[in-house]
Image (spheres, rainbow, N blue to C red):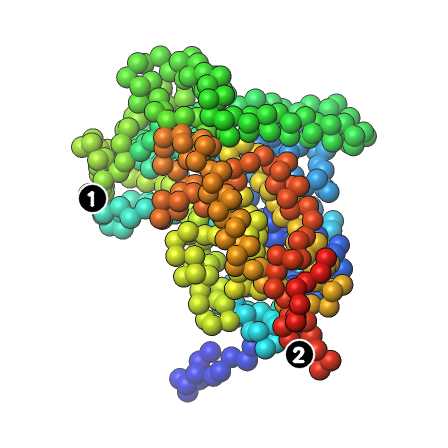
Amino acid sequence: MSRPDGTTASVTRETHEVEALIIGSGLSGIGAAVKLREAGLRDVVLIEKADELGGTWRDNTYPGCACDVPSALYSYSFAPNPEWTRAFATQPELRAYLHRVAAAFGITPLVRFGTEAVRAQWHPAEARWHVETNRDRYTARFLVSAAGPWHEPLVPDIPGLADFPGEVFHSSRWRHDHDLAGARVAVVGSGASAVQFVPAIQPRVARLDLFQRTAQWVLPKPDHYVPGVERRLMRRFPAAQRALRNAEYAAMETLGIGFRHPALLRAVQKVGTLHLRATVRDPRLRRALSPDYTLGCKRLLLSNAYYPALTRSNVTVHATAVEAVRGNRVVGADGTGADVDTIILGTGFHILDMPIAQRVFDADGVRLDERWKGSPDAYLGTTVSGFPNAFILLGPHLGTGHSSAFMVLEAQLEYLAGAVRHFRSAGWSGMDVRPEVQAAFAAEVRQALPSTVYNSGGCSSYYLDGNGRNSFSWPWSTGRMRRRLAEFDPEAYDVTVENSGGLPTRATEGPRS
């Protein structure tokens, strides 16, 4: 802060002591706050760098944005929503749902908006996390990272992109003030976001050039409007909605068997092939859109509008990666190109190189991402050795290609709540997963992954980290995940307890359950 004489005044920052500090207020952060309060913690704070909660459903506002998991399954089990107007909810409904849940459970007042975590470090002498933000400081008994893997947009390093004279933006930072009517648009990427926004903008633009590095498997989307009579039924008879949720869960778990036994996916792959043939008549375009890997190796995509949009006369599909941007021309690696005035990046997110890992430090000042060395690792996808009293939600090793993020999240939340309850009842001051326990779990995952479609499907996907390892996927059923995380396992942890003077001391014997 500058004084009138030009000198700088120091800014006094408050230090707040809390029991639990949650970074992020999307679906993970809201769920964590609910479950931590249920576990007995009263002093819970969420810090959110934006001015609104909602996470990915706040950030992604591109045209056509919607969920690719059935609505009844893409919601908290403890907060069912009978008001979904579509079988697959759209972004505005999902954002509104998260706002309602946060308000109903008293979470909204706990959020400190406009507050970004800058540095979080473990202090063993106090057995607390010290967290610096752009505003105040916090000390916390527990630190929960709920920043999420679909948060920070991935902008590719394309030569000349920074010098492009027109508009450039990522799909998750959509420029609604930029009129696309009559524009010449290049779309870079053909993943989950592009599959939704390309059909939405295609009728408005003069030209659309899609640069597709890899063809995707796109299945028909069984989406439909939910009539008012059905919503009234769900409202009046909650058991009906639970039955629908259970049926959808069972159907997706049945599909998940194929992800673990790829030969069984041939029938589903046939559906994708027939969908492509029925909607794309041009044999050259159909060849360009035909994947050369097993369905499920990449994220499964659903759309009834994507293929038809690509057949329109104002659309050109370039089956190539982008090599460079030269002036206003986007050039593909195969030499094809297009003169455009707008570039939209549908290039995904920093999934495994999570930016939050650059801001979390152990007691020795070593960053979490430095400990990981390019391959994220966590015991049960939740705790990391050397980072006591800290939890990662939607962390490594827990991703599935067939189910809902809420299934993964709620399994973790049960583990988190169980850990906190045991921690408090046992009088612990610190809990740190034993390195050999974490290593054994990682070895178990590595042994199971090679036979899954994630590793054997013949593609390169965001499931693979910078070292070429699959640090994302859970190689078993979500039922097994829920059972594995249902009960906290205290013997997996080295613990400290407070002595009579209130200072942490290492336990002299192993923890007892």
Residue 99 makes an appearance in the image: no
- Crowding near the residue tagged with mark 1, few <14, some 14–19, many ≥20 C-alpha atoms within 10 Å: some
Q: Identify residue type, mark 2.
A: Leu
Residue 154 percent coordinates (x, y):
39, 47
CB atoms at circles 1 and 2 under 8 Å apart? no
Q: Residue at x 41, y 85 (%)?
A: 7
Q: Quadrant of residue 38?
A: bottom right
Q: Identify residue type, mark 1.
A: Gly
Relative placement, left or right, of 147 versus 306 is: right
**Residue 425 position (above or below residue 284):** below
Circle 1 or circle 2, nearest the eye: 2
Q: Residue at x 23, y 42 (%)?
A: 325
Q: Which mark is residue 327?
A: 1
Give the mark, 1 or 2, whose residue is nearer the N terminus.
1
Residue 108 percent coordinates (x, y):
67, 55
Q: Residue at x 44, y 14 (%)?
A: 274
- The quarter of the image holding the C terminus is bottom right
Q: Which mark is residue 456?
A: none
Residue 364 percent coordinates (x, y):
47, 72
- Crowding near the residue tagged with mark 2, few <14, some 14–19, many ≥20 C-alpha atoms within 10 Å: some
Q: Quadrant of residue 45?
A: bottom right
Q: Nearer the viewer, residue 234 or 184?
A: 234
Residue behind mark 2: 503
- Secondary structure of the residue carrying tag 2 is loop
Residue 75 makes an appearance in the image: yes
Q: Residue at x 23, y 47 (%)?
A: 159
